[in-house]
Amino acid sequence: MKKKFSKFLAFALTGAMMTAAFTGCGASGGDTDTADTSADTAAEAETEAEAETEAEDTADEAAGGQKVGIAMPTQSLERWNRDGSYLKEQFEGKGYEVELTYSDNKIDQQVKDIEGLIADEVDLLVVAAIDGESLSQVLADAKDADIPVISYDRLIMNTDAVSYYVSFDNYTVGKLQGEFVETKLDLANAGDKTYNIEFTAGDPADNNAGFFFNGAYDVLKPYIDAGTLVVPSGQTQFDQVATAAWDTATAMERMQNILGSYYSDGQQLDVALCSNDSTALGVTQAIETDYSGSNSVVITGQDGDVANLANIVDGKQTMTVYKAVANEAVATLDLGIALLNGKTPGEELISESGWSFQCAYDTSSYDNGTGIIPSYLLVPTVVTADNIQSELVDTGYYTLDDNGYPQAK
């Protein structure tokens, strides 16, 4: 990078000198002014190049040649591609060397990936676990090597090697979905009116999935108990509605079975509460092909995947809970830098970092089986067709294509 700036500087100076030489051939005072201007331009170019080079040198010096290992679950879900690229970009922007791995949703592969990062002597591990229960041994090796571990987005269980947890308030994600349904159907004022609802939850191996489901269910349970909300399938327990690997096809097949078994006689489905967008995509497809009702079904989601945002624009999906992973990456970056500098940050990291987004420091909610893991929890946002522009496009997270559909930047 420094060589590029040196070339730029040499080119700028040469251009300025040539301009001064040619304009200096004239006899008028105006030519002297032009030469002076060219000299000023060259000086400015030199100053800017030096400033940028100094900024790079400062970042390199601050990073001290340290290396960050990032282990993501898979590239098959859009959101993990965003997370991985944002994290890599943030740490590299501060001068750190970064190794980024994706494990194709294979637990054994993620263990091998982390073993490789440890062997490469990374100074910090950022891990989004495929299975929160399966990394105890490999992270014990990280602890033995004095490598701090940030559990990213998904809490890693049953290991004391985890230093911190960075995520969104996962219970609130589900709570926002439940509250959206509550408001959309005006359940508090439903009277004798009843609505049918079916639940689709996430991967049992993902510790967050239970928080998402419980957040939504806790909001809606009083209406289920009162008979205002009815679940014709009777499937209201997490293990009954869970979806392995958050798989779209699995969610679609399950919903097709529910529709065929409980809604084929004209029964109306009012709400399909889905914990995330990949499951919502499958549920939406099942409703499009296998549901005989004519009503518009309220369908929830989470993540802001491009295909789901298109469905929201088209009126097929009703809402999604968006988690700005760029902000999650920024929080992880500042936390990671503090750890790399030997600090033990607490709540003060939030104010000292000057984040423009909401975040809470939590020391009571997330117990991974070995104790409470100090957590930085960001606040998610409800996105509907009415606020896609203001929440996703105007904020710079997405652009709109020529047909008005959001596209990830």
Image (cartoon, rainbow, N blue to C red):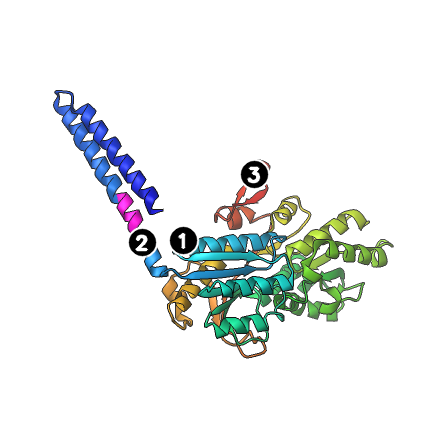
The boundaries of the magenta stretch are 48-57
Q: Nearer the viewer, residue 359 or 124?
A: 124
User: Is the Cβ of the residue at disc 3 closer than 8 Å to that at disc 1?
Assistant: no
Residue drawn at 72 percent across, 62 percent down: 199
4 lies left or right of 17: right
Where does the image place residue 261, in percent across and percent down from the top left? 85, 58
330 lies left or right of 49: right
Viewer-nearest of discs 3 and 2: 2
**Where is mark 2, residue-wise?**
57
Local secondary structure at mark 2:
helix
Q: Nearer the viewer, residue 117 or 288?
A: 117
Q: In the rendered image, is residue 299 in sight?
A: no
Q: Is residue 8 above or below residue 217?
A: above
Viewer-nearest of discs 2 and 1: 2
Secondary structure, magenta segment, majority class:
helix
Amino acid at pointer 2: Asp
